[in-house]
Amino acid sequence: MKVATFLALAVATFGTPGIALTQSLPSTKVLTIDVAQTIAQEALAVCRANGYKVTVLIVDAGNLQKLLLRDDGAPMGTIEVARLKANTAMAFGRPSGPPANLPPGTPAPPPLLPTTTNAMGGVPIKVGDQLIGAVAVSGAPGGDKDAACANAGLTKVADKLK
């Protein structure tokens, strides 16, 4: 009798087991190593075709390094600059670079956060609105060229990012 009373009170208090389990868990997209390799290889190939010695960094949704390619002859500093660009893309969910509303001819202000940069070349990797990582390129003679290589990598896998 005591067990039956206890069970009745437990059900009344906490509900029936299994009801809470009918809710589905959120779905999350993951940046796979295969997709990361394709992005990085294409970004590197486009930069090489233009004569640039670059580093390509891919990070996942947790901003953890997934893949790093440093081309033969790419300077050591390109590794750290690529990391800053990836941090920026992940922190703000937008491409790295100076603020969009900056008047022409005005120097870029210092970055908003430590370990970020206003240099172009870091691009978020998204599936819809979900940020699943970032690609960052460093070493071309100008951030616009770094960004072009990074975007070429994303274009290569656009069909997989849907």
Image (spheres, helix red, strand yellow):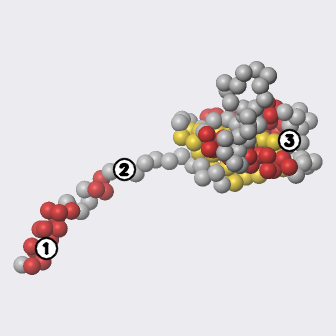
Image-based side of 63 in relation to 119, left or right = left
Q: Nearer the viewer, mark 1 or mark 2?
A: 1
Front in this rendered view, residue 138 or 160: 138
Of the residues under marks 2 and 3, which one precedes in the sequence?
2
In the rendered structure, are the residues bearing label 1 and label 3 in contact, judged by CB atoms less than 8 Å apart? no
Quarter of the image where the N terminus is located: bottom left
| Residue 147 appears in view | no
Amino acid type, mark 3: Gly
- Dot 1 falls on a residue whose secondary structure is helix
- Dot 2 falls on a residue whose secondary structure is loop
Q: Nearer the viewer, mark 2 or mark 3?
A: 3
- The residue drawn where x is 88% and y is 34% is 141
Amino acid type, mark 2: Ser
Residue 139, numbered label: 3
Of the residues under marks 1 and 2, which one precedes in the sequence?
1
Residue 24, numbered label: 2
How many numbered discs sit on the rendered protein?
Answer: 3
The percent coordinates of residue 81 (x first, y second) are 79, 46
Instruction: Check disc 3: other Cα within 10 Å, few if <14, some if 14-19, many if 20+.
Output: many
User: Which residue has dot 1 on it?
Assistant: 6
Image-based side of 27 in relation to 7, left or right = right
Instruction: Check disc 1: other Cα within 10 Å, few if <14, some if 14-19, many if 20+.
Output: few
The percent coordinates of residue 52 (x first, y second) are 89, 38
The percent coordinates of residue 149 (x first, y second) are 78, 35
Residue 60, numbered label: none
